[in-house]
Image: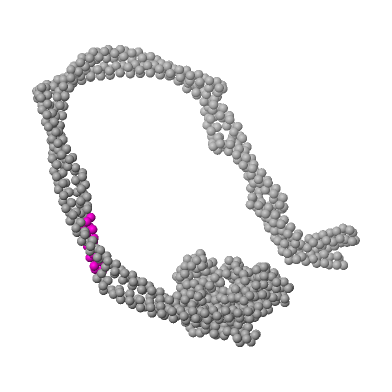
Amino acid sequence: MILHRLVLTNYRGVAHRDIAFPERGVVVISGANEIGKSSMIEALDLLLTIKDRSTKKEVKAVKPTHADVGAEVLAEISTGPYRFVYRKRFHKRAETELTITEPKREQLTGDEAHDRVLAILSETVDTALWEAQRVLQASATSPVDLSGCDALSRALDVAAGDGAGDAGDADPLLVDRIEGEYLKYFTPTGRPTGEWAVAGTRLKAAEAEVKIATEAVAEVEQAVRRHATLTAELAESATRVESARARLAAAQQASDAVAQLTRQRDTARVVADAATATHAASVAAVNERRRLRAEIEERSTSAADLIAVAAESAQAHTTARQAVESAEAAADQARTAAEVAAAAVEEARTTLAALVARDEAARLTVRIDRLEEATAALAEVQRELLGNTMTDALMREIENAARAVERAADQAELASAHIELVALADIRLRVGDEDVDLAAGRDWSLSAGAPTEIELPGLLRARVVPGADALDTHAQLVAAQQVLAEALRRAGAETVEQARDKDARRRELRSEQGRLQSTIGALAGDESPEQLRARYAELTAGQPDIDGDTDGARAALEAAQEAHRTATQHAEAQRALAAAAVTRCNDAAVAAGVQREKLGAAQAELAAANDRLAAERRTAADDALSVAAEAEAERSGRAAAELARLDAELAAAQPDAVAAELDAAARAAQALLREREAAAAALTELSATLKVYGTQGRKGALDAALTEREHAHGEHQRVQRRARAAQTLREVMLRHRDSARARYVAPFRGEIERLGRIVFGADFEVDIDSDLTIRSRTLDGRTVGYESLSGGAKEQIGIVARLACASLVAKEDTVPVVIDDALGFTDPERLTRMSAVFDTVGGDGQVIVLTCSPDRYAGIGDAQLIELSA
């Protein structure tokens, strides 16, 4: 299998990538981390194994997030006699396309193309070898598993046969024929397939048909039994219905008798209620006549009492009117005195306001002067701040740059070459462009971070060249100094100390600015300076010159206000007395009027009552009303007695029990009728079903199913014997083949040791078990188990084993060796030797190396380098 070309479009974070691979040799594909190198292997696996419409999590994981499109993968592959171009688009508008160019041209799409590629790979590619020939990041140190690689087994069979000349081993063609015979009956995992699976399926189907036919016959038998049961139930139901109808008729007759009694009782109740109402009306008329006579006597007494009370109320009203006139005269005098006191208060308030305005103007003068001083000082501070170019961010940049220079200087000092000279006599040296005079016995030292010349004029010139690390650290120091110088230039300072001084002065100015702004704010308050000046002008404008102090004016105002309060309180008291007198006078007038109205009303009501009594007596005399009431009482008693008799007779008939019995009989009859109708309907339906069953031939179907089961069982037994025979023969041949593996382990071990000695030395040996797994390594006479080796050694041996496998397998069985970012644990010397291994076997097949560090593989002579870009 050879991978000629791989194209990824909208795959994870890869928008488009098209890579052509050489058919042979080593190709190194390099790129930064997360550029999508490992995704290329993943994309090839998805293309070859998963359908385009799959919803597996592996497919969902590769959907691009930068666009609403489907991920696409295209590969051009050669395997066996075939060469084809295979493309799939996943997720959105999924599709599959296959173009076979060799051995004959074919074009397929959809699932047909997917199945065709799987068939080609199954025919021509050893899938286990394809999986084993990968070195992935997650499993770079894991031992390589080649036990299931048939291509390697065939190659080792040939190598072992050629070396030993033993013709007794199993013929590979015979093994293949046995394997083919086994695969007629079993899958590679041991599950039944082919004729063996068909026989088993036929037997299961026949048994299922027998079960279905048996259940169908049983269903008919159950229907027949159900028909007989329903016929008996229908006959019994008819008898129960007749009994229920007789019970319902008796209950209905009793209910009619109760209804007749109920109607008679209701009529008697109406008559009794009417007699009671008439008697009550007669009694009410007698009582009303008695009440009216008592009312006339009571109203005559009340009218006599009201005449005396009305005369007393008129005298009280006259006395109250005289008291009102005296109280109003006293209230007018008190009001005049209060007005005089109010005028004195207003005059004292005007004088105090003038004195307060004079004092406020004096305070404003001092406040305005201090505000102007603070404003001038703030302007001076702001002018100096404008001239200071330092900022917090710039100061932090300078401090960071200074610390970077210090760190770079320390690193340069550590990495620089240290030169120490001791003068044995007075001497002058020239170091670079500087002359250095040394007296005898004096020493001199220098740290050289860059190439430096030391010259003894006329005698010696020495050149000190520091290592690469020193040059790098010196370059870093120069770069850091340049960054610091640029920051100082922008700050307007020559040194870091000057910058710090400027920053400290800026902070002082900022603090002074804040203090002055707070002072101005406190002095101005909620007003601007202009508003303060306007208020000063308003206070001083039109104010007369006045002598005195505010305390005396305030005392005079308080005395005037006290006199005004006293006069006001006296006036209010007099007004209250006058108002009370008016109220008493009004109350007396109202009381006199009320008494007059009461007297008039009482006299009118008394006359009306006398008229009403005279009118009623003209209609019926008092004695006639009493006789009529006694007659109505007798008629009411007789009606009540008749009603009591009918109530007793109705209670004896037990109407509730009769109604309950009627309801129960009706429900029972209806339920029995429903049961009879349901049984009849079920019987009719079942009869129709039995007629249908009679036309289906279920017994014949059961006989046919039993016959088919017998035939299927016989066929199953016959195929089972052949399948078990093929299985037994395969197991015997595999055991024979496993016993022969000990012979072909030697060629595999020899190839690994041949390549491994290029890396580890001439005494390199490995121990390999029968399933081709490396168990230990021997080097310098010391044997170490594979699991105990370092990560670098495991990684190197794993790559050597895969390259050895690639060199051993036949040309038609070869698959690409894929190495994903390996040899990260390998030192520079081993990397050089590993490159020699790649050169040794690289021409035998296709080796694809994916790495973010192409320098690791720079020693491979014929490697082709492909650089990936984002």
Q: Is residue 45 left or right of residue 214?
A: right
Residue 324, percent from left and from top: 33, 15
Residue 415 appears in the rendering: yes
Determine the residue positioned at 28% across, 75% down: 697
At horizontal 53% and vertical 30% (from top left) the residue drawn is: 539
**Magenta region includes residue 675:** yes
Q: Nearer the viewer, residue 678 or 151?
A: 678
Whether residue 606 is visible to the viewer of this picture, yes or no, is no
Q: Position of residue 471 (x, y in %)?
A: 73, 64
In the image, 493 versus 47, the foreground residue is 47
Position of 661 compared to 366: left or right?
A: left
**Would you say residue 685 sits in the magenta stretch?**
yes
In the image, residue 296 sits, relative to residue 759, either above or below, namely above
Q: Name the residue: 17% across, 49% down.
A: 251
Q: Residue at x 23, y 19 (%)?
A: 598
* Main secondary-structure element of the magenta-colored stretch: helix
Is 430 located above or below residue 859 in the figure?
Answer: above
Q: Is residue 480 above or below residue 203?
A: above
**Residue 213 vs residue 13, the one in the foreground:** 213
On the image, the x and y values in percent for residue 721 come to 46, 80
**Which residue range is magenta in the image?**
671-689
**Could you say which quadrant of the image residue 269 lies in?**
top left
- Residue 234: % across, % down: 22, 61
Rendered-image quadrant of the N terminus: bottom right
- Left or right position of 247 against 175: left
